[in-house]
Image (cartoon, coloured by chain):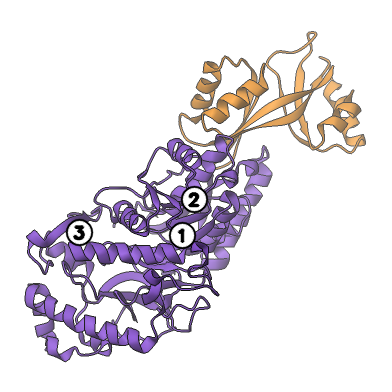
Chain colours: A orange, B purple
Amino acid sequence: MTEILKQVSVFLENTPGHLRKVCSVLADAGVNLQTLTLAESRDYGIVRIIADTPEGAIEALSKAGIAAKLIDVVAVEVADRPGALLGILDKAAQGGLNLDYMYAMTRGINGNPLMIMRFGDAQKAAEILK
Amino acid sequence: MDCNWNDKYGAINPDSALDFLPREQLRALQSQRLSAMVALAYENVPLHRKRMDELGVKPSDIRSIDDISKLPFTQKTDLRDTYPYGLFAVPLSEIVRLHASSGTTGKPIVVGYTREDMDVWAGALKRCLLMFGLTRADIVQVSFGYGLFTGGLGLHGGAEALGCTVIPASGGNSERQLMMLKDFCATAMACTPSYFIHLIDTAQKLGLDMRSFPIKVGVFGAEPWSDQMRKYIEQNAGIEAFDIYGLSEIAGPGVGGECREHDGIHILEDNFYPEIVDPKTGEPLPDGEEGELVLTTLGKRAMPILRYRTHDITSIIAEPCACGRTVRRIRRIGRRSDDMFIIRGVNVFPSQIEAALMRVAECSPHYRILLERKRDLDSVTVEVELNPDAYTDNIASLEALRKRIQASIMNIVNIKIDVRLVEAGKIERSEGKAKRVVDLRKI
Protein backbone atom coordinates (compact mmCIF):
# COMPACT_ATOMS: atom_id res chain seq x y z
CA MET A 1 0.00 0.00 0.00
CA THR A 2 1.26 3.49 -0.87
CA GLU A 3 -0.79 6.52 0.04
CA ILE A 4 -0.40 10.26 0.46
CA LEU A 5 -1.19 11.43 4.00
CA LYS A 6 -1.43 14.88 5.56
CA GLN A 7 1.14 15.27 8.29
CA VAL A 8 0.79 18.00 10.90
CA SER A 9 4.10 19.77 11.54
CA VAL A 10 4.46 21.98 14.57
CA PHE A 11 7.32 24.38 15.33
CA LEU A 12 8.15 24.18 19.03
CA GLU A 13 10.71 25.68 21.32
CA ASN A 14 12.97 23.32 23.21
CA THR A 15 11.58 24.14 26.63
CA PRO A 16 9.83 22.00 29.22
CA GLY A 17 6.08 21.70 28.82
CA HIS A 18 5.80 22.73 25.18
CA LEU A 19 5.10 19.30 23.70
CA ARG A 20 2.67 18.71 26.52
CA LYS A 21 0.75 21.79 25.49
CA VAL A 22 0.42 20.60 21.90
CA CYS A 23 -0.81 17.20 23.08
CA SER A 24 -3.28 18.78 25.46
CA VAL A 25 -4.73 21.04 22.74
CA LEU A 26 -5.13 18.02 20.45
CA ALA A 27 -6.66 15.91 23.21
CA ASP A 28 -9.18 18.64 24.01
CA ALA A 29 -10.12 18.81 20.33
CA GLY A 30 -10.67 15.03 20.29
CA VAL A 31 -7.85 14.44 17.81
CA ASN A 32 -6.41 10.93 17.98
CA LEU A 33 -2.67 10.68 17.37
CA GLN A 34 -1.55 7.78 15.22
CA THR A 35 2.11 8.50 15.44
CA LEU A 36 4.39 11.32 16.48
CA THR A 37 8.05 12.01 15.95
CA LEU A 38 10.36 14.80 17.09
CA ALA A 39 13.20 16.41 15.18
CA GLU A 40 15.30 18.76 17.19
CA SER A 41 17.89 21.49 16.82
CA ARG A 42 19.55 23.41 19.64
CA ASP A 43 16.73 25.84 20.41
CA TYR A 44 13.67 24.42 18.79
CA GLY A 45 12.18 21.25 17.44
CA ILE A 46 9.61 20.17 14.92
CA VAL A 47 6.92 17.77 16.01
CA ARG A 48 5.54 15.70 13.16
CA ILE A 49 2.18 14.15 13.76
CA ILE A 50 -0.04 11.74 11.87
CA ALA A 51 -3.56 12.09 13.26
CA ASP A 52 -7.02 10.83 12.39
CA THR A 53 -8.20 14.35 11.52
CA PRO A 54 -5.28 16.50 10.33
CA GLU A 55 -7.55 19.46 9.49
CA GLY A 56 -9.12 19.30 12.95
CA ALA A 57 -5.64 19.24 14.45
CA ILE A 58 -4.53 22.33 12.48
CA GLU A 59 -7.67 24.22 13.41
CA ALA A 60 -7.32 23.46 17.12
CA LEU A 61 -3.62 24.35 17.13
CA SER A 62 -4.08 27.65 15.27
CA LYS A 63 -6.84 28.62 17.67
CA ALA A 64 -4.43 28.01 20.52
CA GLY A 65 -1.90 30.27 18.78
CA ILE A 66 0.47 27.42 17.89
CA ALA A 67 2.10 27.60 14.43
CA ALA A 68 1.29 24.39 12.56
CA LYS A 69 1.38 23.32 8.94
CA LEU A 70 -0.02 20.50 6.83
CA ILE A 71 2.64 18.67 4.86
CA ASP A 72 2.09 15.93 2.26
CA VAL A 73 3.94 12.75 3.13
CA VAL A 74 3.86 9.29 1.65
CA ALA A 75 2.89 6.25 3.71
CA VAL A 76 4.55 3.17 2.27
CA GLU A 77 3.87 -0.42 3.33
CA VAL A 78 7.15 -2.24 3.81
CA ALA A 79 7.07 -6.05 3.76
CA ASP A 80 8.37 -7.71 6.94
CA ARG A 81 11.45 -9.35 5.47
CA PRO A 82 15.15 -8.58 4.89
CA GLY A 83 15.81 -6.17 2.00
CA ALA A 84 12.23 -4.88 1.73
CA LEU A 85 13.10 -1.29 2.66
CA LEU A 86 16.16 -1.49 0.41
CA GLY A 87 13.91 -2.25 -2.55
CA ILE A 88 11.83 0.83 -1.87
CA LEU A 89 14.86 3.06 -1.49
CA ASP A 90 16.22 1.72 -4.77
CA LYS A 91 13.02 2.69 -6.50
CA ALA A 92 13.20 6.13 -4.96
CA ALA A 93 16.81 6.66 -5.99
CA GLN A 94 16.14 5.50 -9.53
CA GLY A 95 13.20 7.87 -9.73
CA GLY A 96 15.42 10.76 -8.63
CA LEU A 97 13.59 11.23 -5.35
CA ASN A 98 15.41 12.77 -2.41
CA LEU A 99 14.24 11.58 0.99
CA ASP A 100 14.02 14.40 3.57
CA TYR A 101 13.13 12.20 6.51
CA MET A 102 11.36 8.97 7.41
CA TYR A 103 9.77 7.43 10.45
CA ALA A 104 7.59 4.42 11.27
CA MET A 105 3.90 4.34 12.14
CA THR A 106 3.15 2.79 15.52
CA ARG A 107 0.54 0.60 13.89
CA GLY A 108 1.32 -1.22 10.65
CA ILE A 109 -0.92 -2.55 7.91
CA ASN A 110 -1.56 -6.17 6.84
CA GLY A 111 0.91 -7.29 9.51
CA ASN A 112 3.61 -5.19 7.81
CA PRO A 113 5.28 -2.03 9.11
CA LEU A 114 4.17 1.26 7.57
CA MET A 115 6.85 3.88 6.93
CA ILE A 116 6.08 7.59 6.61
CA MET A 117 8.41 9.24 4.10
CA ARG A 118 8.81 12.88 3.21
CA PHE A 119 9.98 13.79 -0.30
CA GLY A 120 9.98 17.19 -2.00
CA ASP A 121 7.19 16.07 -4.33
CA ALA A 122 4.77 13.69 -2.64
CA GLN A 123 2.64 13.08 -5.77
CA LYS A 124 5.60 12.03 -7.84
CA ALA A 125 6.94 9.88 -5.00
CA ALA A 126 3.62 8.11 -4.56
CA GLU A 127 3.58 7.31 -8.30
CA ILE A 128 7.12 5.93 -8.27
CA LEU A 129 6.72 3.90 -5.09
CA LYS A 130 3.33 2.46 -6.03
CA MET B 1 -13.08 72.64 1.04
CA ASP B 2 -11.52 71.28 4.18
CA CYS B 3 -9.45 68.89 2.14
CA ASN B 4 -7.43 71.75 0.65
CA TRP B 5 -6.18 73.08 3.96
CA ASN B 6 -2.43 72.67 4.25
CA ASP B 7 -2.28 71.12 0.84
CA LYS B 8 0.94 72.11 -0.90
CA TYR B 9 -1.03 74.31 -3.28
CA GLY B 10 -3.97 75.09 -1.04
CA ALA B 11 -4.62 77.70 1.58
CA ILE B 12 -3.17 77.53 5.07
CA ASN B 13 -5.55 76.61 7.83
CA PRO B 14 -5.47 79.56 10.26
CA ASP B 15 -4.86 77.11 13.10
CA SER B 16 -1.59 76.10 11.43
CA ALA B 17 -0.42 79.67 10.83
CA LEU B 18 2.41 79.42 13.38
CA ASP B 19 3.89 76.51 11.40
CA PHE B 20 4.43 78.90 8.50
CA LEU B 21 5.75 82.08 10.19
CA PRO B 22 8.62 83.80 8.39
CA ARG B 23 11.83 82.77 10.24
CA GLU B 24 12.59 86.30 11.47
CA GLN B 25 9.15 86.64 13.01
CA LEU B 26 9.44 83.18 14.52
CA ARG B 27 12.79 84.09 16.10
CA ALA B 28 11.34 87.29 17.53
CA LEU B 29 8.48 85.30 19.05
CA GLN B 30 10.88 82.70 20.45
CA SER B 31 13.12 85.40 21.96
CA GLN B 32 10.23 87.15 23.60
CA ARG B 33 8.78 83.92 25.00
CA LEU B 34 12.17 82.66 26.20
CA SER B 35 12.91 85.74 28.29
CA ALA B 36 9.46 85.68 29.86
CA MET B 37 9.76 81.96 30.61
CA VAL B 38 13.25 82.27 32.10
CA ALA B 39 12.08 85.12 34.36
CA LEU B 40 9.16 82.99 35.54
CA ALA B 41 11.41 79.99 36.18
CA TYR B 42 14.08 82.02 37.98
CA GLU B 43 11.63 83.74 40.27
CA ASN B 44 9.50 80.74 41.17
CA VAL B 45 11.56 77.54 40.92
CA PRO B 46 14.42 77.21 43.44
CA LEU B 47 16.26 74.59 41.37
CA HIS B 48 16.36 76.75 38.23
CA ARG B 49 17.43 79.80 40.25
CA LYS B 50 20.21 77.86 41.99
CA ARG B 51 21.50 76.42 38.70
CA MET B 52 21.44 79.81 36.97
CA ASP B 53 23.15 81.46 39.91
CA GLU B 54 25.87 78.80 39.79
CA LEU B 55 26.51 79.71 36.16
CA GLY B 56 26.27 83.42 36.93
CA VAL B 57 23.33 83.90 34.54
CA LYS B 58 20.57 86.37 35.36
CA PRO B 59 17.17 86.45 33.61
CA SER B 60 18.17 89.85 32.20
CA ASP B 61 21.03 88.15 30.31
CA ILE B 62 18.51 86.22 28.24
CA ARG B 63 17.34 88.69 25.59
CA SER B 64 17.29 86.64 22.44
CA ILE B 65 16.80 82.99 21.57
CA ASP B 66 20.55 82.82 20.82
CA ASP B 67 21.20 83.32 24.53
CA ILE B 68 19.62 79.94 25.25
CA SER B 69 22.98 78.17 25.36
CA LYS B 70 23.87 80.24 28.45
CA LEU B 71 21.18 78.42 30.42
CA PRO B 72 21.76 75.32 32.55
CA PHE B 73 20.52 71.89 31.48
CA THR B 74 17.68 70.05 33.20
CA GLN B 75 18.09 66.29 33.61
CA LYS B 76 15.52 63.59 34.21
CA THR B 77 17.02 63.11 37.67
CA ASP B 78 16.13 66.74 38.49
CA LEU B 79 12.48 65.89 37.94
CA ARG B 80 12.83 62.86 40.20
CA ASP B 81 14.76 64.70 42.90
CA THR B 82 12.10 67.41 43.12
CA TYR B 83 9.22 64.88 43.26
CA PRO B 84 6.38 65.63 43.20
CA TYR B 85 5.87 69.39 42.79
CA GLY B 86 9.34 70.88 43.16
CA LEU B 87 9.60 72.27 39.61
CA PHE B 88 6.16 73.91 39.54
CA ALA B 89 6.33 77.65 38.96
CA VAL B 90 2.74 78.44 39.91
CA PRO B 91 0.65 77.62 43.00
CA LEU B 92 -1.27 74.34 42.88
CA SER B 93 -4.52 76.29 42.76
CA GLU B 94 -3.61 77.20 39.17
CA ILE B 95 -2.84 73.63 38.16
CA VAL B 96 -5.75 71.90 36.43
CA ARG B 97 -4.11 68.62 35.42
CA LEU B 98 -1.39 66.27 36.59
CA HIS B 99 0.28 63.53 34.59
CA ALA B 100 3.07 61.20 35.61
CA SER B 101 5.58 58.88 34.01
CA SER B 102 5.22 55.15 34.55
CA GLY B 103 8.16 55.26 36.94
CA THR B 104 9.88 51.99 36.11
CA THR B 105 12.67 52.91 38.49
CA GLY B 106 11.56 54.32 41.80
CA LYS B 107 9.33 57.36 42.01
CA PRO B 108 7.46 58.58 38.97
CA ILE B 109 7.99 61.95 37.35
CA VAL B 110 5.07 64.31 37.92
CA VAL B 111 4.14 67.07 35.49
CA GLY B 112 1.46 69.76 35.88
CA TYR B 113 -0.52 71.98 33.54
CA THR B 114 -2.34 75.27 34.04
CA ARG B 115 -5.51 76.00 32.09
CA GLU B 116 -3.41 77.94 29.54
CA ASP B 117 -0.90 75.09 29.34
CA MET B 118 -3.73 72.71 28.47
CA ASP B 119 -4.71 75.03 25.62
CA VAL B 120 -1.12 75.28 24.40
CA TRP B 121 -0.84 71.50 24.48
CA ALA B 122 -4.14 70.86 22.71
CA GLY B 123 -3.23 73.58 20.19
CA ALA B 124 0.09 71.89 19.46
CA LEU B 125 -1.61 68.53 18.99
CA LYS B 126 -4.20 70.12 16.76
CA ARG B 127 -1.44 71.49 14.55
CA CYS B 128 0.12 68.02 14.39
CA LEU B 129 -3.18 66.43 13.39
CA LEU B 130 -3.59 69.09 10.69
CA MET B 131 -0.12 68.15 9.42
CA PHE B 132 -1.37 64.58 9.07
CA GLY B 133 -4.16 65.86 6.84
CA LEU B 134 -6.91 65.31 9.43
CA THR B 135 -9.90 67.64 9.69
CA ARG B 136 -12.98 68.00 11.87
CA ALA B 137 -14.63 65.46 9.58
CA ASP B 138 -12.36 62.68 10.85
CA ILE B 139 -13.20 60.01 13.39
CA VAL B 140 -10.19 59.41 15.60
CA GLN B 141 -9.78 56.30 17.75
CA VAL B 142 -7.37 57.10 20.57
CA SER B 143 -5.82 53.85 21.74
CA PHE B 144 -2.97 55.21 23.78
CA GLY B 145 -3.55 54.45 27.45
CA TYR B 146 -5.76 56.94 29.28
CA GLY B 147 -4.71 57.91 32.75
CA LEU B 148 -1.45 59.28 34.11
CA PHE B 149 0.28 58.61 30.78
CA THR B 150 0.10 61.72 28.57
CA GLY B 151 -0.63 59.76 25.37
CA GLY B 152 -4.34 59.02 25.72
CA LEU B 153 -5.76 62.18 27.26
CA GLY B 154 -3.30 64.31 25.28
CA LEU B 155 -4.38 63.03 21.87
CA HIS B 156 -7.95 63.12 23.07
CA GLY B 157 -7.74 66.84 23.84
CA GLY B 158 -6.00 67.62 20.56
CA ALA B 159 -8.46 65.71 18.39
CA GLU B 160 -11.39 67.24 20.23
CA ALA B 161 -9.90 70.73 19.83
CA LEU B 162 -9.72 70.10 16.08
CA GLY B 163 -13.37 69.08 16.15
CA CYS B 164 -12.88 65.42 15.25
CA THR B 165 -15.19 62.72 16.51
CA VAL B 166 -13.12 61.10 19.24
CA ILE B 167 -13.39 57.44 20.25
CA PRO B 168 -11.67 57.24 23.66
CA ALA B 169 -10.77 53.57 23.27
CA SER B 170 -7.66 53.58 25.50
CA GLY B 171 -5.36 50.54 25.26
CA GLY B 172 -6.06 46.82 25.39
CA ASN B 173 -8.61 44.32 24.15
CA SER B 174 -7.48 44.03 20.55
CA GLU B 175 -10.62 42.36 19.22
CA ARG B 176 -12.73 45.17 20.58
CA GLN B 177 -10.36 47.76 19.13
CA LEU B 178 -10.83 46.17 15.71
CA MET B 179 -14.58 46.07 16.14
CA MET B 180 -14.66 49.80 16.96
CA LEU B 181 -12.32 50.67 14.11
CA LYS B 182 -14.63 48.89 11.70
CA ASP B 183 -18.10 49.57 13.10
CA PHE B 184 -17.50 53.18 14.19
CA CYS B 185 -15.83 53.89 10.82
CA ALA B 186 -12.72 55.39 12.44
CA THR B 187 -10.64 57.20 9.82
CA ALA B 188 -7.60 57.58 12.07
CA MET B 189 -6.08 55.77 15.01
CA ALA B 190 -3.49 56.92 17.54
CA CYS B 191 -1.41 54.31 19.39
CA THR B 192 2.12 52.93 19.61
CA PRO B 193 3.40 51.48 16.32
CA SER B 194 4.10 48.11 17.94
CA TYR B 195 0.53 47.90 19.21
CA PHE B 196 -0.79 48.71 15.76
CA ILE B 197 1.29 45.86 14.31
CA HIS B 198 -0.25 43.64 16.95
CA LEU B 199 -3.70 44.75 15.76
CA ILE B 200 -2.80 43.94 12.14
CA ASP B 201 -1.76 40.46 13.24
CA THR B 202 -4.89 40.01 15.33
CA ALA B 203 -7.06 41.08 12.39
CA GLN B 204 -5.35 38.53 10.16
CA LYS B 205 -5.96 35.80 12.73
CA LEU B 206 -9.63 36.73 12.82
CA GLY B 207 -9.79 36.63 9.04
CA LEU B 208 -10.26 40.42 8.78
CA ASP B 209 -8.43 42.56 6.25
CA MET B 210 -7.66 45.98 7.72
CA ARG B 211 -7.17 47.35 4.22
CA SER B 212 -10.93 47.16 3.79
CA PHE B 213 -11.53 49.28 6.94
CA PRO B 214 -12.28 53.03 6.62
CA ILE B 215 -9.07 53.94 8.52
CA LYS B 216 -6.67 55.97 6.40
CA VAL B 217 -4.28 57.60 8.88
CA GLY B 218 -2.20 56.18 11.73
CA VAL B 219 -0.75 58.47 14.41
CA PHE B 220 2.15 56.66 16.00
CA GLY B 221 4.44 57.65 18.84
CA ALA B 222 5.82 56.94 22.32
CA GLU B 223 8.55 54.63 21.01
CA PRO B 224 11.11 54.63 18.20
CA TRP B 225 10.04 52.78 15.07
CA SER B 226 11.87 51.99 11.87
CA ASP B 227 11.06 52.71 8.23
CA GLN B 228 10.63 48.97 7.80
CA MET B 229 7.91 48.97 10.46
CA ARG B 230 6.28 51.88 8.65
CA LYS B 231 6.30 49.96 5.39
CA TYR B 232 4.81 46.90 7.07
CA ILE B 233 2.04 48.98 8.66
CA GLU B 234 1.21 50.94 5.53
CA GLN B 235 1.10 47.86 3.33
CA ASN B 236 -0.86 45.65 5.66
CA ALA B 237 -3.39 48.19 6.90
CA GLY B 238 -3.66 50.36 3.78
CA ILE B 239 -3.04 53.59 5.70
CA GLU B 240 -0.60 56.49 5.77
CA ALA B 241 1.50 56.34 8.94
CA PHE B 242 2.66 59.48 10.74
CA ASP B 243 5.17 59.93 13.49
CA ILE B 244 4.15 62.10 16.41
CA TYR B 245 6.85 63.13 18.84
CA GLY B 246 6.61 64.20 22.43
CA LEU B 247 7.58 63.50 26.00
CA SER B 248 5.74 64.11 29.24
CA GLU B 249 8.51 66.23 30.72
CA ILE B 250 8.00 68.80 27.95
CA ALA B 251 4.24 68.49 27.34
CA GLY B 252 3.39 65.01 26.11
CA PRO B 253 2.69 64.09 22.49
CA GLY B 254 2.52 67.08 20.15
CA VAL B 255 6.01 68.50 20.57
CA GLY B 256 6.33 67.76 16.88
CA GLY B 257 4.95 65.72 14.02
CA GLU B 258 5.60 64.59 10.51
CA CYS B 259 4.04 66.40 7.56
CA ARG B 260 2.90 64.54 4.46
CA GLU B 261 6.38 64.82 2.94
CA HIS B 262 7.45 62.20 5.53
CA ASP B 263 10.92 63.66 5.68
CA GLY B 264 11.57 64.38 9.34
CA ILE B 265 9.51 65.67 12.25
CA HIS B 266 8.55 69.35 12.43
CA ILE B 267 9.16 70.59 15.95
CA LEU B 268 6.61 73.23 16.92
CA GLU B 269 9.47 75.47 17.89
CA ASP B 270 7.39 78.48 18.81
CA ASN B 271 6.46 76.40 21.89
CA PHE B 272 9.25 73.83 22.19
CA TYR B 273 12.71 75.05 21.26
CA PRO B 274 15.06 72.33 19.96
CA GLU B 275 18.85 72.25 20.23
CA ILE B 276 21.30 69.47 19.45
CA VAL B 277 24.22 68.97 21.82
CA ASP B 278 27.13 66.58 22.09
CA PRO B 279 25.76 63.89 24.44
CA LYS B 280 29.09 63.64 26.27
CA THR B 281 30.21 67.26 26.62
CA GLY B 282 26.88 69.10 26.32
CA GLU B 283 28.42 71.45 23.71
CA PRO B 284 25.81 72.78 21.24
CA LEU B 285 26.19 71.33 17.74
CA PRO B 286 25.23 73.11 14.50
CA ASP B 287 22.12 72.17 12.52
CA GLY B 288 22.69 69.02 10.49
CA GLU B 289 25.00 67.38 13.00
CA GLU B 290 23.84 64.38 14.96
CA GLY B 291 23.68 64.56 18.73
CA GLU B 292 21.29 64.59 21.68
CA LEU B 293 18.07 66.55 21.37
CA VAL B 294 17.61 69.22 24.05
CA LEU B 295 14.22 70.89 24.44
CA THR B 296 13.12 74.08 26.18
CA THR B 297 9.48 74.92 26.80
CA LEU B 298 8.66 78.44 25.65
CA GLY B 299 4.97 78.57 26.43
CA LYS B 300 4.43 76.52 29.55
CA ARG B 301 3.61 78.21 32.84
CA ALA B 302 3.03 75.41 35.34
CA MET B 303 6.37 73.75 34.81
CA PRO B 304 8.84 75.67 32.68
CA ILE B 305 11.69 73.39 31.67
CA LEU B 306 15.09 74.78 30.69
CA ARG B 307 17.12 72.79 28.18
CA TYR B 308 15.86 69.30 28.97
CA ARG B 309 18.22 66.47 28.00
CA THR B 310 15.92 64.06 26.12
CA HIS B 311 18.55 61.36 25.44
CA ASP B 312 17.00 61.07 21.97
CA ILE B 313 19.66 61.01 19.28
CA THR B 314 18.86 62.95 16.10
CA SER B 315 19.87 65.99 14.07
CA ILE B 316 18.10 69.20 13.06
CA ILE B 317 17.21 69.67 9.40
CA ALA B 318 17.44 73.41 8.74
CA GLU B 319 16.62 73.24 5.03
CA PRO B 320 13.09 74.38 4.17
CA CYS B 321 10.54 71.59 3.90
CA ALA B 322 8.66 71.03 0.67
CA CYS B 323 5.40 71.44 2.61
CA GLY B 324 6.23 75.11 3.16
CA ARG B 325 6.40 74.99 6.95
CA THR B 326 9.15 77.13 8.41
CA VAL B 327 9.40 75.33 11.77
CA ARG B 328 12.53 73.22 11.56
CA ARG B 329 12.54 69.45 11.42
CA ILE B 330 14.49 66.78 13.26
CA ARG B 331 15.34 63.42 11.75
CA ARG B 332 13.04 60.66 12.93
CA ILE B 333 14.33 59.28 16.18
CA GLY B 334 15.68 55.78 15.82
CA ARG B 335 17.73 55.56 18.93
CA ARG B 336 18.31 56.96 22.37
CA SER B 337 21.60 57.61 24.03
CA ASP B 338 20.39 55.57 27.01
CA ASP B 339 18.96 52.44 25.36
CA MET B 340 22.24 51.75 23.65
CA PHE B 341 24.01 48.74 25.09
CA ILE B 342 27.67 47.91 24.94
CA ILE B 343 28.62 44.37 24.09
CA ARG B 344 32.26 43.36 23.99
CA GLY B 345 33.16 47.01 23.61
CA VAL B 346 30.83 47.63 20.68
CA ASN B 347 27.96 50.12 20.95
CA VAL B 348 24.73 48.56 19.75
CA PHE B 349 21.35 50.25 19.33
CA PRO B 350 18.17 48.13 19.25
CA SER B 351 17.18 49.98 16.07
CA GLN B 352 20.20 48.49 14.30
CA ILE B 353 19.13 44.98 15.24
CA GLU B 354 15.62 45.78 14.05
CA ALA B 355 16.87 47.09 10.72
CA ALA B 356 18.91 43.89 10.27
CA LEU B 357 15.90 41.68 11.06
CA MET B 358 13.60 43.53 8.70
CA ARG B 359 16.03 42.93 5.85
CA VAL B 360 15.18 39.25 6.10
CA ALA B 361 11.76 38.71 4.55
CA GLU B 362 10.89 35.75 6.80
CA CYS B 363 11.22 37.78 10.03
CA SER B 364 8.12 39.19 11.69
CA PRO B 365 8.31 42.57 13.48
CA HIS B 366 8.17 40.78 16.83
CA TYR B 367 11.57 40.40 18.45
CA ARG B 368 13.43 41.02 21.64
CA ILE B 369 17.03 41.33 22.63
CA LEU B 370 18.28 39.42 25.65
CA LEU B 371 21.45 40.52 27.38
CA GLU B 372 23.01 37.86 29.55
CA ARG B 373 26.27 37.27 31.29
CA LYS B 374 27.72 33.81 30.83
CA ARG B 375 30.96 33.00 32.63
CA ASP B 376 31.82 36.70 33.00
CA LEU B 377 31.22 37.30 29.30
CA ASP B 378 28.38 39.39 27.96
CA SER B 379 26.22 37.61 25.48
CA VAL B 380 23.41 38.91 23.31
CA THR B 381 20.64 36.75 22.00
CA VAL B 382 18.01 37.99 19.61
CA GLU B 383 14.74 36.12 19.80
CA VAL B 384 12.63 36.58 16.72
CA GLU B 385 9.29 35.26 15.55
CA LEU B 386 8.92 34.35 11.90
CA ASN B 387 6.10 35.21 9.56
CA PRO B 388 3.55 32.37 9.60
CA ASP B 389 4.61 30.94 6.21
CA ALA B 390 8.24 30.82 7.20
CA TYR B 391 7.78 28.10 9.84
CA THR B 392 8.69 25.27 7.50
CA ASP B 393 8.80 21.60 8.35
CA ASN B 394 12.44 21.42 7.47
CA ILE B 395 15.16 21.85 10.09
CA ALA B 396 17.90 22.35 7.51
CA SER B 397 16.10 25.30 5.91
CA LEU B 398 15.22 26.78 9.32
CA GLU B 399 18.87 26.55 10.34
CA ALA B 400 19.90 28.18 7.07
CA LEU B 401 17.42 30.97 7.77
CA ARG B 402 18.77 31.39 11.29
CA LYS B 403 22.29 31.80 9.87
CA ARG B 404 21.02 34.30 7.32
CA ILE B 405 19.48 36.41 10.09
CA GLN B 406 22.70 36.18 12.05
CA ALA B 407 24.70 37.31 9.03
CA SER B 408 22.34 40.22 8.47
CA ILE B 409 22.92 41.40 12.07
CA MET B 410 26.66 40.83 11.75
CA ASN B 411 26.59 43.01 8.66
CA ILE B 412 25.22 45.97 10.56
CA VAL B 413 26.66 45.75 14.06
CA ASN B 414 29.82 43.84 13.28
CA ILE B 415 29.65 41.41 16.16
CA LYS B 416 28.35 37.90 16.32
CA ILE B 417 24.99 37.79 18.01
CA ASP B 418 23.14 34.59 18.72
CA VAL B 419 19.76 34.26 17.04
CA ARG B 420 16.96 32.12 18.39
CA LEU B 421 13.88 31.37 16.31
CA VAL B 422 10.87 31.31 18.59
CA GLU B 423 7.25 30.25 18.25
CA ALA B 424 4.68 32.69 16.93
CA GLY B 425 3.14 34.60 19.83
CA LYS B 426 6.04 34.00 22.22
CA ILE B 427 7.22 37.64 22.28
CA GLU B 428 4.97 39.66 24.53
CA ARG B 429 2.83 42.17 22.61
CA SER B 430 2.92 45.55 24.24
CA GLU B 431 0.07 47.96 24.50
CA GLY B 432 2.35 50.77 25.54
CA LYS B 433 5.99 51.04 24.65
CA ALA B 434 7.41 47.81 23.28
CA LYS B 435 10.14 46.50 25.54
CA ARG B 436 12.81 45.41 23.11
CA VAL B 437 15.78 44.92 25.40
CA VAL B 438 15.74 42.57 28.36
CA ASP B 439 18.88 42.95 30.44
CA LEU B 440 19.43 39.84 32.56
CA ARG B 441 23.01 40.76 33.41
CA LYS B 442 23.82 40.93 37.08
CA ILE B 443 26.90 43.07 37.37
Is B13 drawn above or below residue B393 in the view shown?
A: below
The circle drawn on residue B187 is 2
The secondary element bearing badge 2 is classed as loop
Q: Which mark is residue B440?
A: none
On the rendered structure, is B61 left or right of A24? left
Tag in front: 3 or 2: 2
Q: Residue at x 29, y 82 (%)?
A: B281
Question: x%, y% of residue A53?
Answer: 66, 18
Label pair 3/2, CB-CB below 8 angstroms: no
On-image quarter of the N terminus of chain A: top right
Q: Residue at x 34, y 54 (%)?
A: B160
Q: Residue at x 52, y 17 (%)?
A: A28
Determine crowd level at label 1: few under 14, some 14-19, many 20+ residues with C-alpha closer than 10 A: many
Q: Is residue B66 left or right of residue B98?
A: right
- Against A55, is B319 above or below? below
- Report, in whole angstroms, how far the alpha carbon at label 3 lies from the one at label 2: 34 Å
